[in-house]
């Protein structure tokens, strides 16, 4: 599969909140850097996503809404590696942020998450 196809599958999995779709797009060396959860590898991803679902459902309840809406996708390809910047929101919650994703011909290599939030007052 081409890097762009892996990226599309990854985005689809996140939108649906489906760990099986997402893990099918991941390279064996995948690392997700989430400032709330730490570093997540491919083997730990399903458990991570389950925890995220619990947080989301705790805020909005169980709905048929997608886990994420992904917009503002910008990509750059360099020597076979796609770098993608995305803006994401969790419908029905105040949770939103951006992601920096790296994808190669073996799948999604990494993502670094950033949450959009106000800083605590000093």
Image (tube, rainbow, N blue to C red):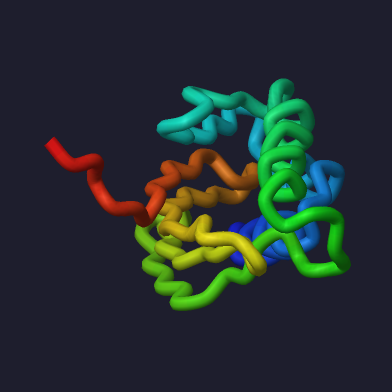
Residue 16 occupies quadrant: bottom right
Q: Is residue 55 above or below residue 88?
A: above
Residue at 36 percent of width and 59 percent of height: 78
Q: Which of 108 and 79 is in front in this view?
A: 108
Image position of 57 (left or right of 97) = right
**Residue visible at 79% across and 69% down in the picture:** 65
**Image: 109 above or below 18:** above
Quick one: which residue is furthest to the bottom in this view? 72
Residue 57, placed above or below residue 93: above
Mark count:
0
- Measured as percent of width and height from the top left, residue 26 is found at 68, 41
Expressed as whole percent of the image width and height from the top left, the position of residue 119 reads 24, 45
Q: Quadrant of the N terminus?
A: bottom right
Q: Which of these two is toward me, 10 or 105?
A: 10
Residue visible at 65% across and 62% down?
Answer: 68
Can residue 55 be seen at all in this image of the molecule?
yes
Give the percent coordinates (x, y) of residue 64. 87, 67
66 relative to 27 in the view: left or right: right
Q: Residue at left 65%, top 68%?
A: 91
Q: Is residue 5 visible?
A: no
On screen, 108 above or below 83?
above
Which corner quadrant holds the C terminus?
top left
Give the percent coordinates (x, y) of residue 39. 50, 24
> Given the current orientation, which residue lies at the most extreme left position?
122
Taking depth in this image into account, of 112 and 118 the one nearest to the observer is 118
């Amino acid at each position: 599969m081409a890097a762009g196809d892996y990226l599309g599958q990854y985005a689809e999995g996140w939108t649906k909140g489906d760990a099986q779709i997402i893990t099918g797009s991941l390279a064996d060396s995948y690392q997700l850097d989430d400032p709330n959860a730490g570093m997540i590898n491919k083997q730990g991803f399903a458990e991570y996503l389950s925890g995220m679902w619990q947080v989301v459902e705790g805020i909005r309840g169980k709905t048929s809404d997608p886990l994420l809406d992904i917009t503002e996708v910008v990509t750059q390809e360099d020597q076979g590696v796609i770098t993608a910047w995305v803006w994401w929101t969790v419908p029905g919650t105040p949770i939103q942020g951006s992601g920096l994703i790296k994808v190669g011909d073996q799948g999604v290599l990494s993502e670094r998450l950033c949450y959009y939030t106000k800083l605590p007052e000093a």
